[in-house]
Image: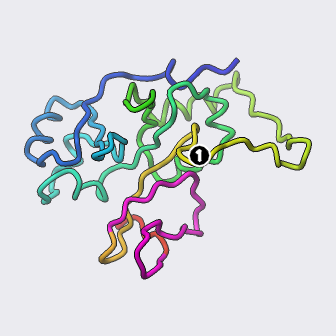
């Protein structure tokens, strides 16, 4: 049986609302801890350390989010094997620093990306067999909404956009469409 991500979690982080002023965030992180930035709905949108805020000249964490490390929100009871076998594992390619574990509407822990990678590299890890459901893959019972295995919030950097997208998977070389409902439609622009 594969351990849950929660069994590998670190509960030491500082929850920071994204409306936190930058000076206040710097003070909260001065001791060297990890901050998890949360939007108004309580969802994690970025990871931040004190050093990440050096040279950032914006009024609050919300406007700093495009410059911070992305995170992946995952249900706390998901196993390492479930996450590894899901499309959400591709979100690690976004440069996510941590998996943020959720239990209902609250963040309960973080798993550094290196810890998850160490499990995948372990000789004890056996990848799941590539078996399709009997109806050729039609057995997918996932309902709309947040996938249990993860979403990564990514701010679109297209000039004039700034929409917070929530990605369930990521493919290099094929950026998804920005999820902003207002026209004009455009591809999600990430990075610098």
Q: Residue at x 25, y 31 (%)?
A: 14
| Left or right, 150 with reference to 112 | right
Question: Does the segment drawn in magenta span residue 146?
Answer: no
What is the x, y in percent for residue 160? 30, 76
Q: Residue at x 34, y 46 (%)?
A: 46
What is the x, y in percent for residue 131? 86, 40
Q: Please, is residue 32 above or below residue 179 in the view?
A: above
Quarter holding the N terminus? Answer: top right
Q: Please, is residue 84 above or below residue 9 in the view?
A: below
Q: Nearer the viewer, residue 48 or 181?
A: 181
Question: Does the segment drawn in magenta span residue 167?
Answer: yes
Q: Please, is residue 143 above or below residue 11 in the view?
A: below
| Left or right, 136 with reference to 112 | right
Picture quadrant of residue 56:
bottom left
What is the x, y in percent for residue 115? 50, 29
Q: Which colouring convention does the figure follow?
A: rainbow
Instruction: Rate crowding at label 1 as few (under 14), some (14 to 19) or many (20 or more) other CA atoms within 10 Å.
Output: many
Per the picture, the main secondary structure of the magenta-coloured stretch is loop
Quarter holding the C terminus? Answer: bottom left
| Left or right, 96 with reference to 33 | right
Q: Nearer the viewer, residue 32 or 6?
A: 6
Element marked by disc 1: helix
Picture quadrant of residue 156:
bottom left
Span colored in magenta: 162-186
In the displayed image of the protein, which residue is found farthest to the right? 134
- Circle 1 sits on which residue? 88
Q: Residue at x 37, y 42 (%)?
A: 43
What is the x, y in percent for residue 137? 83, 48
Picture quadrant of residue 143:
top right
| Left or right, 127 with reference to 161 | right
Q: How many marks?
A: 1
Q: Residue at x 88, y 49 (%)?
A: 136
């Amino acid at each position: 049986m594969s351990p849950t991500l929660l069994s590998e979690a670190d509960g030491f982080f500082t929850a920071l609302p994204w409306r936190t002023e930058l000076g206040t965030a710097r003070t909260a992180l001065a001791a060297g801890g990890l901050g998890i930035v949360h939007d108004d709905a309580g969802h994690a949108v970025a990871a931040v350390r004190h050093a990440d805020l050096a040279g950032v000249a914006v009024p609050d964490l919300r406007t700093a989010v495009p410059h911070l490390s992305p995170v992946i929100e995952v249900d706390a009871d998901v196993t390492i094997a479930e996450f590894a076998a899901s499309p959400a594992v591709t979100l690690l390619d976004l440069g996510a620093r941590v998996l943020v574990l959720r239990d209902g509407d609250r963040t309960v822990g973080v798993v550094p990306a290196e810890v998850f990678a160490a499990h995948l590299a372990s000789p004890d890890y056996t990848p799941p067999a590539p078996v399709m459901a009997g109806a050729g893959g039609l057995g997918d019972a996932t309902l709309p909404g947040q996938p249990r295995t993860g979403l990564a919030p990514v701010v679109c950097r297209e000039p004039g956009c700034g929409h917070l997208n929530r990605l369930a998977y990521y493919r290099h070389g094929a950026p998804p469409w920005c999820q902003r409902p207002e026209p004009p439609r455009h591809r999600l622009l990430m990075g610098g």
